Image (cartoon, rainbow, N blue to C red):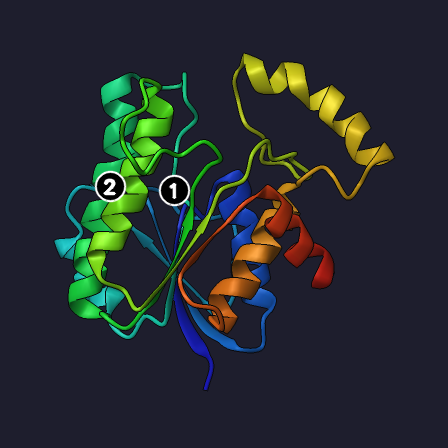
Amino acid sequence: MGKTVLLTGATGMVGGRVLDLLLDRSDVEHVVAVGRRETAVTNRKLRAVVHADFLDFSAAEGQFAGIDVCFHCLGVYQGQVSKSAFFEITCDYQKALTDTLARVSPGATFVLFGASGADPGETSRAWFALAKGRAENLLAEAGFPKTYIFRPGYIHPTGARRPTGLPYRLIRPVAGALLRVFPRLALTDRDLARAMVTVGLEAVADSRIFDNRTIKRIALARPE
């Protein structure tokens, strides 16, 4: 019998790639995608759950039963929202999710789409690093038996879903050229999704953090 997977951020750049891979896996029986809007994907394995309040998952708690693996890909780019909103989305949304999931499916494996530069010591003056570090600490406190945190740097988009904002518009052409010349150095959304899905579903290693180089190595070892 295949695994039942919970996914957030399925309409995002990385979450969309994760969803596609999960639906193609023979060892995945059901994917529960929780989001504020429906995905554009139709598949017999997919159960899309539209949920408005990411600070309170009590109304969706029944969907969290029997979850084997959770991929938390929900996030927002720095600069798109205020500092307080960034902390709410990065930390408070995650805590509401893990509180509910730990209560209903305490044996689940949890995979977090984090970021390079996260400061789990929570001493950084950079609020991006502080928020990402706090999210990692909150995950550790949730008590799941296995947690995998992925800390990518720049992620090059390869599909229709692309980040917004001036920094990405400026760096994307340069990164695209780098990817063509040195494909083993640049990390794409497909690479990250492949590594996350591989690690999360196999759940062989103890809880750990994956940096950019390790993510790329796993992705290359498991080509599409």
State if disc 1 and disc 2 touch (CB < 8 Å).
yes
Helix, strand or loop at disc 1? loop
- Residue type at mark 2 is Tyr
Q: Position of residue 209 (x, y in %)?
A: 45, 51
Q: Is residue 88 above or below residue 209?
A: above
User: Could one spot residue 208 in this view of the protein?
Assistant: yes
Q: Nearer the viewer, residue 52 or 98?
A: 98
Q: Which mark is residue 154?
A: none
Can I make out residue 224 in this image? Answer: no
Residue holding disc 1: 74
* Residue 51 screen position, x and y as percent: 25, 47
Read off the residue under disc 2: 93
Residue neighbourhood size for the residue with mark 2, other residues' Cα within 10 Å, grouped as few (<14), some (14–19), many (≥20)? some
Total numbered circles:
2
Residue closest to the eye, 124 or 41: 124
Q: Residue furthest right?
A: 181
Q: Residue at x 49, y 35 (%)?
A: 116
Q: Position of residue 108 (x, y in %)?
A: 31, 69
The outermost residue toward the bottom is: 1
Residue at x 80% of width, y 41% of height: 183
Q: Amino acid at mark 1?
A: Leu
Q: Residues within 10 Å of mark 1 (few under 14, many from 20)?
A: many
Lateral position of residue 172 relative to residue 6, left or right: right
* Quarter of the figure with the N terminus: bottom left
Residue 68 coordinates in the image, percent (x, y): 36, 72
Q: Residue at x 32, y 70 (%)?
A: 67
Residue at the image point whose x is 18% and y is 68% from the top: 104
Query: Where is 70 relative to 25, above or below?
Result: above
Side of 59 where 52 appears, left or right: right
